[in-house]
């Protein structure tokens, strides 16, 4: 069964492009830790909200990714570009087409 991790990033005003430039390479590393896929999308209603989705077979692979030294360093690099706290929400797909 697939597990979907969703992280809502509330980015500081006027920092969106800087955040995306710095964080996109870190988000892309998810597949190297076992994610089936990943994506970042932006809210139309509130352009300061970005959501990062990744699909995993095992939650433990996400944990290895999220708490790895390279992701910790990447989060440290962008620490002043988003509002805290930052917690993943887990979802399970129930239907698709």
Image: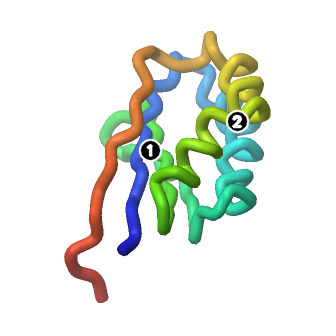
Residue at 43% across, 40% down: 7
Residue 1 locus on image (x, y percent) = 36, 74
Instruction: Classify mark 2: helix, strand or loop.
Output: loop
Residue at 47% across, 40% down: 50
* Occupied quadrant, residue 23: top right
Q: Earlier in the sequence, mark 2 or mark 1?
A: 1
Identity of the residue furthest to the front in this view: 60
Crowding near the residue tagged with mark 1, few <14, some 14–19, many ≥20 C-alpha atoms within 10 Å: some
Placement of 59 over or under 68, stated as above or below: below
Residue at 59% across, 63% down: 35
Residue at 54% across, 43% down: 63
Q: Name the residue under label 1.
A: 51
Distance between the alpha carbons at the discs numbered 2 and 1: 20 Å
Residue 97 locus on image (x, y percent) = 30, 88
Placement of 11 over or under 24, stated as above or below: above
Q: Mark 2 points at which residue?
A: 68
Look at discs 2 and 1 and give the one toward the viewer.
2
Placement of 23 over or under 32, stated as above or below: above
Q: Which of 90 and 25 is in front in this view?
A: 90
Identity of the residue furthest to the bottom in this view: 97
Residue 52 locus on image (x, y percent) = 49, 47
Q: Which of 49 and 45 is in front in this view?
A: 49
Instruction: Classify mark 1: helix, strand or loop.
Output: strand
* Occupied quadrant, residue 45: top left
Number of numbered discs present? 2
Identity of the residue furthest to the left in this view: 94
Along the horizontal axis of the image, is 41 left or right of 18?
Answer: left
Marks 2 and 1 close (CB-CB < 8 Å): no
């Amino acid at each position: 069964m697939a597990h979907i991790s969703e992280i809502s990033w509330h980015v500081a005003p006027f920092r969106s492009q800087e955040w995306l430039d710095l964080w996109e390479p870190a988000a892309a590393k998810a597949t190297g830790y076992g994610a089936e896929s990943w994506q970042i999308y932006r809210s139309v209603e509130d352009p300061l909200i970005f959501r990062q989705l990744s699909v995993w077979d095992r939650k433990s692979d996400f944990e290895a990714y999220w708490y790895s030294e390279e992701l910790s360093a990447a989060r440290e690099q962008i620490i002043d570009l988003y509002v805290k706290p930052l917690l993943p929400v887990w979802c399970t797909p129930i239907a698709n087409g």
